[in-house]
Image (tube, rainbow, N blue to C red):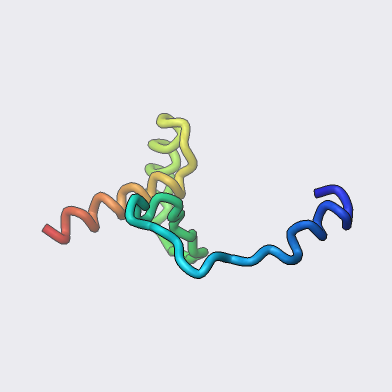
């Protein structure tokens, strides 16, 4: 939408009263939000995680998140 005339076409758009979601897929476009958190880890633990992440070519935060998620799924059983 480059200019005001193009955007003006959508100003009077009205939603329908009813929509059919019977074929919809729950959670299809859901993307979990990330939350900034501060953790204090021992130096040797952090070095180990960074080394493992480097070998897997991923960020160490992603590795920590994955490890915690695996722990959570095991703890629920």
Q: Quadrant location of residue 27? A: bottom left
Q: Residue furthest left?
A: 77
Furthest-front residue in view?
A: 17
Q: Position of residue 28 (x, y in %)?
A: 40, 50
Outermost bottom residue: 17
Foreground of the two, 36 or 29:
29
The total of numbered circles placed on residues is 0
Give x and y (percent) for residue 60: 45, 44
In which quadrant will I find the C terminus?
bottom left
Question: 8 left or right of 38?
Answer: right
Q: In the figure, residue 76 lies in which quadrant?
A: bottom left
Identified at 64% across, 66% down, the residue is: 14
Residue at left 42%, top 30%? 55
Residue 7 lies left or right of residue 29; in this view the side is right
In the foreground, 31 or 7: 7
Eyeballing the image, is 37 above or below 56?
Answer: below
- Whole-percent x and y of residue 37? 48, 65
Task: Residue at 73%, 66% (x, y): give it.
Answer: 12
């Amino acid at each position: 939408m480059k200019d005001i005339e193009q955007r003006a076409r959508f100003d009077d758009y009205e939603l329908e009263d009813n929509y059919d979601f019977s074929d919809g897929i729950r959670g299809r476009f859901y993307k979990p939000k990330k939350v900034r958190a501060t953790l204090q880890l021992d130096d040797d633990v952090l070095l180990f995680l960074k080394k493992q992440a480097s070998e897997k070519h991923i960020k160490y935060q992603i590795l920590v998140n994955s490890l915690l998620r695996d722990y959570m799924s095991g703890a629920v059983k």
